[in-house]
Image: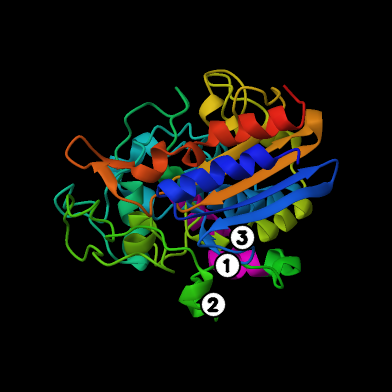
Amino acid sequence: MLLSNLDQMINASIESGLDSAQLLIAKNHKIIKHSAYGNADLKTLYDIASLTKIFSLTALYQVYTTQGKINLDLTLKEIFPNYFTDKSLANKSDITIKMLLAHEAGFEPNPLFYDKSYNTELFCHNRDNFLAKLLKAPLIHAPQSCSLYSDVDFMLLTFILEHLLHTKLDMLFQATFPELKSQRICYQPLQHNYSISEIAPTELHGNTRDGFIHFDNIRTETIHGEVQDEKAYHCMNEISGHAGLFANCEALYSALQLMNIPIEFLQSQSDDPSFGLGWRLNKGGDMAYHFGHYASEEAYGHTGWTGCVFIIDPKYDLTIIYLTNRKHSKVLNPARNPHRFLGDILWAGQYKNIMNEIYQSLGLN
């Protein structure tokens, strides 16, 4: 009964247009709630979007840094010397792996590499040719001058990892975490024997934002079983460290149990304490949209654009994993904001509401 109000509120959002949700809460190393809502069950896979940054890429860097196989101070020029014979890349030559993990490299947040009208020089729909385009992405800040969340960082980190370890990211993920083989977590689920019925749909009208956006080869049908993120789909063949993983709550909880997080990865960056290495931290600016108002300053986690969030709060030995497909709803006003969907404004589509209710119900406020 402790969390009954949470169920009522999520179900009310389902009735108002949220398609589905899945929730896992663990307290003192025990799962105390594991529920599914709407058009989902506990096995349903979700496109976890930027949660991929933690569960795939950051997790792998943590392992190989700990093993001494990767040096976080390696620079782009040291890693990819052949590319840096191009003098136009000189301003990026000293960017390190650590800067990329901390989102301190200086790249803009979301270059539209997949849209020719954005920039013909950067346009690319081929993973084999994409690294050269990525390295040419413009800097909008000097490296290490500030933290600015950018998918470019984690796409570059994908190619770095593949280059240093001579293995493609999806294969590396499987080989590094064999314990997850029995769990429902993978890239490209339709190629791993999952059926459409086992996967939550992600967006109603492809990437068009209800017909408002257009570019060559844009998907117009419901996105279902393919990664929603345009860069991951068109530029990275659905296999990237910034987006692309599909999973359910149980698999993500199992993945967290395998993680050995080096202290360095959870240390705040000097210019913005909410950034660790890969991780977002409940420190510094207003992080209530993610962590709610009652999480401790020790809490850390990540969010995903499709409607996914998780937090770990060591002070209360609390883990919350919450997955939705909130973007699988109508765009409210495409002309004003093509990225704001009905699911985003419903009670259960807002992470802080979920977190606040859980903390209050557990008496942690």
- In the image, 103 versus 187, the foreground residue is 187
At label 1, which amino acid type do we have? Answer: Cys
- Which residue is outermost to the bottom? 193
The residue under the point 46% across, 53% down is 325
Q: Residue 156 appears at what percent x and percent y?
A: 45, 50
Q: Please check the rendered image and state whether residue 158 is part of the magenta-colored stretch, yes or no.
A: yes
First to last magenta residue range: 154-174
Please report contact status of discs 1 and 2: CB closer than 8 Å, yes or no: yes
Q: Give the residue at mark 3.
A: 248
**Magenta-colored segment: predominant secondary structure:** helix
**For the residue carrying disc 3, how many other residues have a C-alpha within 10 Å: few (<14), some (14-19), or many (20+)?**
many
Q: Residue 305 appears at what percent x and percent y?
A: 44, 45
Mark found first going from the N terminus, 1 or 3: 1
Which is more foreground, mark 1 or mark 2? 2
Q: Name the side, left or right, on which 64 lies relative to 11.
A: right
The residue under the point 47% across, 54% down is 243
Which is more foreground, mark 1 or mark 3? 3
Q: Residue 40 appears at what percent x and percent y?
A: 55, 62
Q: Give the residue at mark 2.
A: 194
The residue under the point 55% across, 44% down is 10
**For the residue carrying disc 2, how many other residues have a C-alpha within 10 Å: few (<14), some (14-19), or many (20+)?**
some
Q: Name the side, left or right, on which 184 lies relative to 329.
A: right
At label 2, which amino acid type do we have? Answer: Tyr
Q: Secondary structure at mark 2?
A: loop
Disc 2 versus disc 3: distance between alpha carbons? 13 Å
